[in-house]
Amino acid sequence: MPISPIYYELVMPIVVLLILMVFILIMRYFSYRERITLIKQGFVPPDLFNAPKSKVAVGLMRAGLITTMVSLFLLIGLWVGLGQGAWLIGGFIPVGVGIGLIFSSWFSHHSEPQSGIDQPAQVKNEQELDEETVH
């Protein structure tokens, strides 16, 4: 019995997205359980959302390079396979996104470190130290 085309066009993408979402949820759950276990044992888990600037810049550079290279090969494949036409926009847009990520990485790496989030905590700690030395 042949498989109908609707299966490939509609059902398969939905199944793939559901599998991806279940995988992401399972990974998030394991990360949550790990953090809770660390807290119960008295450890302070590392902050996941305030990564150091240098790691962020390296991650942006990697993402930019990967996006740019993949989209350049996609662009070349579209050009060779189909010729010039509106479909080349499918290669030009990711190239722009990749170049934007590379520039973003460069600017975040070379900018002065900002102490926007860390500064209030540092000021609070200094005030607590001043109060302890006075009393």
Image (tube, grey):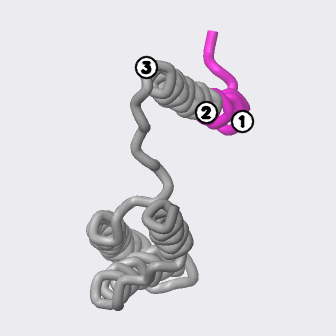
Label 2 or label 1, whichever comes before in sequence order: 1
The label nearer to you, 3 versus 2, is 3
Which amino acid, mark 2?
Met
Q: Position of residue 132 (x, y in %)?
A: 48, 60
Q: Please, is residue 127 above or below residue 135 in the view? A: below
Number of residues whose C-alpha sits closer than 10 Å to that of mark 2, classed few (under 14), some (14–19) or many (20 or more): few
Task: Identify the residue at image location x=45%, y=49%.
Answer: 47
**Helix, strand or loop for disc 2:** helix
Q: Secondary structure at mark 3?
A: loop
Residue assigned mark 2: 21
Q: Quadrant of residue 55?
A: bottom left
- Eyeballing the image, is 127 above or below 46? below
**Magenta region:** 1-17
Left-right relation of 8 to 61: right
- Residue 88 image offset from top left, x and y in percent: 48, 79
Report the amino acid beneath label 3. Answer: Gln
The answer to the question of whether label 2 and label 1 lie on touching residues, with beta carbons closer than 8 A, is no
Q: Which element carries disc 1, helix, strand or loop?
A: helix
Please give the label number shown on residue 41: 3
The answer to which of 76 and 126 lies nearer the viewer is: 126
Mark nearest the camera among 2 and 1 is 2
Q: Quadrant of residue 60?
A: bottom left
Residue drawn 54% across and 28% down?
Answer: 32
User: In the image, is 124 to the left or to the right of 108?
Assistant: right
Residue 19 seen anywhere in this rendered image of the structure: no
Is residue 12 shown in magenta? Answer: yes
Disc 1: which residue = 10
Q: Gap in Å between the C-alphas at discs 2 and 1?
A: 17 Å
Looking at the image, is mark 3 or mark 2 earlier in the sequence?
Answer: 2
